[in-house]
Image: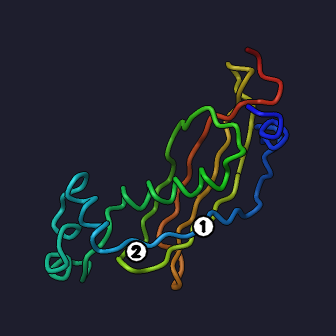
Amino acid sequence: MTDSGEALAIWLEDLTLDATIDCGTFRLSEREIIDFAAQYDPQEFHLSRAAGEASIFGGLIASSTQSLAISCGLVVRANRNVRFVCGAAWEDIELFRPVRPDTDYAVRARWTSARPSASKPDRGIANIAIEVADGEGPVMRYGIAYFVWRRARRS
């Protein structure tokens, strides 16, 4: 890590709890939804507009797995200076409405807790709450527990 990277590093002890973090936006095209579904979630309402329209969803919708992955990527990028060890758990995933093509979705997050690990003194566990919303309100909410390095970690 460079000196400037070290100066910008955010360790477990530095996380600001309960402050809103604007993580950016995403928009999926019909083609992106269909291509993802063909490879990872081949349910009919993800694969064709006609099948989506005939479903309870009334139109083509994105896989929740795709929506979670994209929003998680935005969260990690927005927290690029946080010294993540790795993810520990997905938590409390709530899906309110489907993600649809050609719609803008905003992703916001906030750190809700941070505590040292009881068994590994060089790291701790931090929880982040994430919300994905369109112009009508929340589409999904979920949390992620991450392991994060502590400032005075041991080698």
Q: Amino acid at mark 2?
A: Arg
Q: Which residue is mark 2?
A: 97
Q: Quadrant of residue 87?
A: top right
Name above or below for residue 71 compared with residue 13.
below
Residue 93 in the image: x percent, y percent?
A: 46, 56
Q: At x 70% / y 37%, what residue is drawn?
A: 83
Q: Is residue 7 left or right of residue 143?
A: right
Disc 1 element: strand
Q: Amino acid at mark 1?
A: Gly
Figure colour scheme: rainbow
Q: Quadrant of residue 129?
A: bottom right
Q: For marks 2 and 1, give the one nearer the viewer.
A: 1
Name above or below for residue 5 compared with residue 60.
above
Q: At x 25% / y 61%, what residue is drawn?
A: 35
Q: Alpha-carbon neighbours of circle 1 within 10 Å: few (<14), some, or many (≥20)? A: some
Q: Nearer the viewer, residue 58 or 33?
A: 33
Q: Is residue 52 left or right of residue 116?
A: left
Q: Nearer the viewer, residue 51 or 145?
A: 51
Q: Which residue is mark 1?
A: 24
Name above or below for residue 77 compared with residue 134.
above
